[in-house]
Image (cartoon, helix red, strand yellow):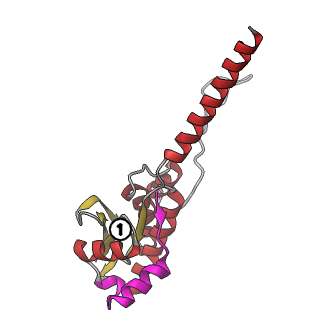
């Protein structure tokens, strides 16, 4: 009887262990994604490159995807006789993505109209060439405020909700500040009005 109980417990533990390991092995790695430099429409190229780099950095923080190395992307574009800013169509993005071994390509543009900036971002499937997800942002103010918009778009374009701390930066103009509430004091020895 003791051996039967021991064997059943041993068998149960081994079964649970095998189930646990098979679940770990069965998990697919996150998809590989490359980010092309965004197209500049009314802004200096260096500003758009800086903003695109901020998007890349924030996308890496999401851990929802594997970000393809930028140097490898540039190498393939050079071999194909393209520049990052010259690859603006979905078909071009899909072709470059196939050469990189990426499942998705992220591209977009940043435009300026008066004091207002617009950011258009899309994630294109390399296999179908179709836009899987598109996100936009509109911002009015100094160009530095676009940094927060790019960070928020990074989360949204991979299908995630941006962290509350990041969304709070948007509402206070990109500056992280502490909010303080002041409650009424309890009167002691004086009237409530005083």
Q: Is residue 81 magenta?
A: yes
Say whether residue 126 is left or right of residue 59.
left
Residues 152 and 58: in front is 58
The spot of residue 162 in percent (x, y) is: 45, 52
Q: Residues within 10 Å of mark 1 (few under 14, many from 20)?
A: many
The residue pinned by badge 1 equals 106
Residues 26 and 98: in front is 26
Q: Is residue 158 above or below residue 38?
A: above
Q: Quadrant of the C terminus?
A: top right
Residues 136 and 191: in front is 136
Question: Which residue is most to the top?
Answer: 1
Residues 168 and 128: in front is 128
Residue at the spot x=49%, y=82% of the render? 71
Q: Is residue 171 above or below residue 82?
A: above
Q: Quadrant of the N terminus?
A: top right
The spot of residue 84 in percent (x, y) is: 36, 83
**Residue 34's quadrant in the figure?**
bottom left
What is the span of residues highlighted in magenta in the rendered image? 65-86
Residue at the spot x=29%, y=85% of the render? 86
Q: Is residue 58 above or below residue 26?
A: below
Is residue 111 at least partly visible in the picture? no
Say whether residue 185 is left or right of residue 69.
right
Question: Which residue is most to the right?
Answer: 2
Q: Is residue 192 magenta?
A: no
Residue at the spot x=45%, y=68% of the render? 55
The spot of residue 74 in percent (x, y) is: 43, 84
Q: Is residue 123 above or below residue 77?
A: above
Helix, strand or loop at mark 1: strand
Say whether residue 193 is left or right of residue 41.
right
């Amino acid at each position: 009887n003791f051996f039967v109980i021991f064997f059943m417990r041993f068998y149960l533990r081994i079964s649970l262990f095998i189930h646990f390991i098979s679940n770990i092995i069965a998990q697919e790695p996150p998809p590989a994604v490359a980010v092309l430099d965004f197209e500049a429409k009314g802004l200096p190229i260096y500003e758009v490159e800086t903003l695109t780099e901020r998007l890349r950095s924030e996308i890496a923080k999401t851990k929802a995807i594997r970000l393809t190395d930028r140097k490898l992307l540039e190498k393939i574009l050079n071999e194909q006789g393209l520049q990052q800013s010259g690859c603006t169509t979905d078909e071009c993005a899909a072709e470059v993505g196939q050469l990189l071994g990426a499942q998705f390509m992220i591209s977009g543009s940043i435009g300026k109209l008066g004091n207002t900036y617009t950011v258009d971002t899309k994630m294109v499937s390399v296999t179908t060439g179709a836009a899987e997800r598109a996100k936009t942002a509109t911002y009015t103010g100094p160009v530095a405020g676009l940094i927060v918009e790019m960070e928020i778009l990074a989360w949204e374009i991979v299908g995630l909700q941006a962290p509350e701390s990041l969304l709070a930066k948007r509402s206070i103009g990109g500056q992280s500040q502490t909010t303080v509430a002041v409650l009424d004091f309890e009167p002691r020895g004086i009237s409530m009005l005083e």
